[in-house]
Image (cartoon, rainbow, N blue to C red):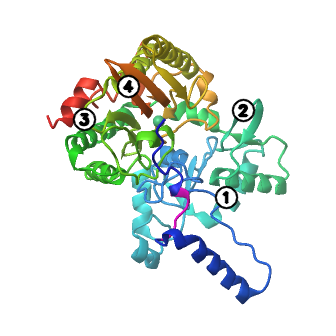
Amino acid sequence: MKTNKKVHSGIFRDGGAGNHAKRRYRDRRRKLMEREGSLMAVTGVPYGPGGKTVWAYSHSPTYQEPSMMYLTGINQNNVILLLDPKSKVSKEILFVGRKDRIMEFWEGVRFGVGDRESLKEVQSVTGIKDVRDIGEFKDVLKERFFANKKKALGTFWYEGIRKGRKTSITTDHNYDFKQKLAGWLREWKAPKGALRNIMANHFDLRLPLDKYDIQNARKAQEITGEGFKAMLKNFGEFKNECQVQGFLEGKMLMNTPYGLSYPSIVASGVNATILHYMKNDDPISKNEMMLIDFGVRWMTMHADITRTFPVSGKFNPMQKMLYEIVLRGQREVEKTARAGITVEELNEVCWEVINNELEKKFRGSGGKCKLRYENRPHGVSHLMGEQEHDGDPFRNYATQPMQAGWMISNEPGLYGDFKIRLNGKTYDETIGIRIEDNLVMTPKSCMNLSRNIPKSVKDIERLMAGN
Ligand SMILES: [Mn+2]
């Protein structure tokens, strides 16, 4: 079956040297060795973009740690919040850096202490009266910890069960901060177990969206949907994936100052079978389908949408059959989703429907297929909110009853090599189909925030015809 694209070319850059690239790189290494004459070790980046800051991509205008954003709304680095519920002096202390006019000349305005105006401003916008120099944090913490009889200190870090074992994300700033606190507690001879994880309580509060969050999430959907519709109407102009990406992202970014939810996946043909394809540089050809996974933020809320459509503007009979199988799975998930149901139950519904439909409709009509996975390619839903993927990263939430106000994705997919003969014509394609909407749970059902983003065969064909 067809695999006509260089799916590996994203991981090797020839620097324009083409066939000479290998020699060019080898010469560079040789010259360095000649000069140095001794043992050397050079490291590559230890993690990719977003690897340490999953919510904040390199050009993201909102980059705050989501737990801090949720608690203060402050979008600047080097801040600490201390909460002391039993204190009679002040229950909330915000620590920020000192006002630095020279730095502000380069990077823009920041809240800072040592400046009456700035102090008044941070107090009035956050409602936190006690704002101090971050350099005093350790001393203040010690004083407060002892005043609380050294009983407990809570902080946020990612902890959960993975493969039956309790484990933590140890590579981010939350964990570094927790380790620093643990060191100080040892220094202060705190009792064992004094350091506590606030993650569970924090997520209990943060995950059910309030009316403002939902309003913002709707706005993110609206902008994302308008971008998608404009892109489909102009689809005839595009020759390759990056033109589709540029047009779509440009349209969306014109309507939000909060940036993309994540870098778009724009994948045509076989590329759509790579779940996190981001190379986005292949030419597109008219017999393929195209999968795009995209969205913007509004305020701190994210849209996370996927749509799949035929490059030609018209689904061929096999594409339509497979597409409608995925759509059917998605509809069943939406019908089932409500508070009290678990994500795992949605998975059961989704993949059973899709596998059954594939058996009945596709194989039942003589179709042959080789899927890229066994049973299910990925989960049908993840939590959303302050982060595009929210909740504990170990997804322990998948087995917990959902609460009203939780926002989740609904994203069934189908990926593989498909071949069928229909109406006297043979279709033989490598296809990736994913259709993704975002749902907010209510006590008895759910709201589909993405319902205005076209996805039926009819609506997509109409838009691509320019109507
Ligand atoms: Mn998603």
Q: Nearer the viewer, residue 445 or 320?
A: 320
Range of residues picked out in magenta: 10-15
**Which residue lies under the disc numbered 3?**
313
**Residue 227, image quadrant:** top left
Amino acid at the residue labelled 3: Gly
In the image, what residue type sits under mark 2?
Ile
Reply above or below: 292 against 129.
above
Q: Upstream in the sequence, badge 1 or badge 2? A: 1
Q: Secondary structure at mark 3?
A: loop
Q: Amino acid at mark 4?
A: Thr
- Asked if residue 278 shows in the view, the reply is yes
Going from N to C along the chain, the mark reached first, 2 or 3, is 2
Are there few (<14), some (14-19), or many (20+) residues within 10 Å of tag 3?
A: many
Residue holding disc 1: 140
Q: Which residue is mark 2?
A: 161
Position of the C terminus, as image quadrant, is top left
In the image, residue 173 lies at what x, y percent?
63, 54
Chief SS of the magenta region: loop
- Labels 4 & 3 near each other (Cβ < 8 A): no
- Nearer to us of marks 2 and 3 is 3
Residue 137, position as x, y percentages in the image: 65, 60
Q: CA distance from mark 3 to mark 1?
A: 64 Å
Mark with earlier residue (4, 1): 1
Distance of label 2 from label 3 (alpha carbons): 45 Å
Residues at discs 4 and 2 in contact (Cβ within 8 Å): no
